């Protein structure tokens, strides 16, 4: 048993982000798989850790911590190397702003519970759910591409030449996009940064296919 226990789902993009951060920082953790398709995130045991009934949840020596962005920033403060956020206030604000395009604009309207609600309440079929996903993914990606291609702070990664918080969000989202056949040809800068992320072993090890519960 380690000091950190990650309750997560192999395919969850927010779980991918946290796994990648833990790997980047060289932190050992126990992996607890939860099947979202089977509703295991709604068990009484998990709700005691995360009343929202979502993943990921990182159990720390101080207690359980839900919400992926909060987990990433906590990890960065407690284990500061390698840093996920820049040293300067503007850099940190810019990185958070880029990360929020994925975390606050794309993900909330495209996560599994929203897609299941569209099906259950409105009779949306698989093609309709995929079209919904692509609409909001494209809206966020277009904003990311415009900013990343124009802002001088962009380097090999979203902010300079080291992988950081915004890159973890970007790369996890691009992985998720493939399941819904999002056309990435309109986003060359996003694609370039994603390719750079996939060159990093810690991030490759975090992808869904490499997890013990991958099916």
Image (cartoon, grey):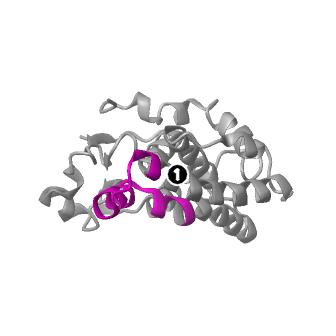
- Residue at the location (64% across, 60% down)? 139
Q: Nearer the viewer, residue 159 or 124?
A: 124
Q: Nearer the viewer, residue 185 or 148?
A: 185
Query: In the drawing, does residue 192 fall left or right of residue 109?
Result: right
**Coordinates of residue 14 in the picture (x, y in percent):** 45, 52
Given the current orientation, which residue lies at the most extreme left position? Answer: 44
- Residue at the location (34% across, 41% down)? 29
SS assignment at label 1: helix
**Coordinates of residue 64 in the picture (x, y in percent):** 29, 61
State which quarter of the image contains the N terminus. Answer: top left
Residue 167 included in the magenta stretch of the image:
no
Inspect this view and state whether residue 54 appears.
Answer: yes
Query: In the drawing, does residue 50 fall left or right of residue 68?
Result: left
What segment carries the magenta color?
105-128
Q: Is residue 16 above or below residue 105?
A: above
**Coordinates of residue 177 in the picture (x, y in percent):** 54, 44
Q: Nearer the viewer, residue 28 or 109?
A: 109
State which quarter of the image contains the C terminus. Answer: top left
Q: Is residue 190 above or below residue 50?
A: above
Label 1: which residue? 131
Inspect this view and state whether residue 161 appears.
Answer: no
Majority SS type along the magenta span? helix
- Residue at the location (29% across, 67% down)? 52
Other-residue count near label 1 (Cα within 10 Å), few / some / many at <14 / 14–19 / ≥20 = some
Q: Exactly how many numbered labels are in the figure? A: 1
Residue 107 included in the magenta stretch of the image:
yes
- Residue at the location (77% across, 50% down)? 160
**Coordinates of residue 197 in the picture (x, y in percent):** 64, 37
Q: Where on the picture, by quarter, is residue 45?
A: bottom left
């Amino acid at each position: 048993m380690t000091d950190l226990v990650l309750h997560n789902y192999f395919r969850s993009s927010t779980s991918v982000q946290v796994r990648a951060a833990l790997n980047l920082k060289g932190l050992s953790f126990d992996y607890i798989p939860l099947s979202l398709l089977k509703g295991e995130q709604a068990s009484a045991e998990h709700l005691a850790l995360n009343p929202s009934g979502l993943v990921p949840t990182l159990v720390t020596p101080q207690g359980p911590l839900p919400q992926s962005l909060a987990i990433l920033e906590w990890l960065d403060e407690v284990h500061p190397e390698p840093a996920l956020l820049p040293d300067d206030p503007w850099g940190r604000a810019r990185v958070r702003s880029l990360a929020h395009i994925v975390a606050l604009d794309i993900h909330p309207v495209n996560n599994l519970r929203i897609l299941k609600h569209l099906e259950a309440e409105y009779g949306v079929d698989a093609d309709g759910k995929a079209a919904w996903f692509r609409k909001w993914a494209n809206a966020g990606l277009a904003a990311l591409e415009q900013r990343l291609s124009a802002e001088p702070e962009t380097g090999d990664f979203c902010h300079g030449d080291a992988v950081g918080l915004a890159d973890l969000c970007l790369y996890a989202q691009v992985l998720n996009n493939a399941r819904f056949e999002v056309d990435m040809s309109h986003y060359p800068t996003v694609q370039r940064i994603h390719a750079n992320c996939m060159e990093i072993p810690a991030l490759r090890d975090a992808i869904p296919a490499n997890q013990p519960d991958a099916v």
